[in-house]
Amino acid sequence: MPHLENEQRPPRGEFRVSVTKDYLVFASAHFITFAGHRCEGLHGHNYRARVTLDGEINQESWFVFDFVEIKRIMRRLCDEIDHKVLLPLQNPKIQIAEQGESVTVAYEGKPRYVFPKSDCALLPVSNTTVEMLAELLTNRLHAELERVGARGLTAIEMEIEENFGQSAVYRTSLTSTG
Ligand SMILES: [Zn+2]
């Protein structure tokens, strides 16, 4: 075994782990606004999430991050917005108001929808595009990773697909979990 010593050195390359599962999906309704005065009608997608974590190898476990934990967190984040109407709280053209058990939605001041509050996910985004959903879920995942004390991660990449072959990816570098 002449090379054993070399083989036991810490790896110098970079590692990346990736998770996408049948249950990392959310079937949700939404509509987006476009530049100018165009607004989609309400419709739904079977969204699918794929998450990728870049990081250092943990030299006790020899993984970047525990797959069980990442799947558990991602499943919860998807479940939170599954079977909901996704509504953007930061869209200047859309006015959202909670009234008792209802949420009323107006577009450019004209009433448009009333939903049961329990069926809505009010999201801190400007538009419910897959780009903004990818960023939002990345931020929520990052907060959860910090909460569970994840270490050594250098980047999170989140892909949200809304139709086959139609997705957006958001990637953020991490400096605070090292
Ligand atoms: Zn859509």
Image (cartoon, rainbow, N blue to C red):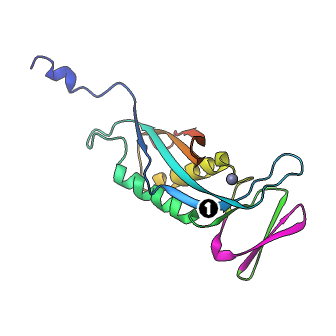
Observer-nearest residue: 154 or 43? 43
Instruction: State the residue in front, 120 or 112.
Output: 112
Queried whether the magenta region covers residue 145, the answer comes back as no
Q: Quadrant of the C terminus?
A: top left
Q: Secondary structure at mark 1?
A: strand
Looking at the rendered structure, the number of numbered marks drawn on it comes to 1
Q: Main secondary structure of the magenta part?
A: strand
Residue that sits furthest to the top in the current view: 2
Q: Is residue 64 above or below residue 43?
A: above
The stretch drawn in magenta includes residue 105 = yes
Residue 9 visible, this angle? yes
Range of the magenta residues?
102-121
Say what amino acid the circle numbered 1 marks: Ser
**Image coordinates for residue 99, horizontal then vertical, percent:** 77, 79
Which residue in the structure is indicated by mark 1?
Answer: 28
Mark 1 Cα-neighbour bin, 10 Å: few <14, some 14–19, many ≥20? many
**In the figure, is residue 8 to the left or right of 29?**
left
Q: Is residue 31 left or right of residue 167?
A: right
Q: Residue at x 49, y 46 (%)?
A: 50
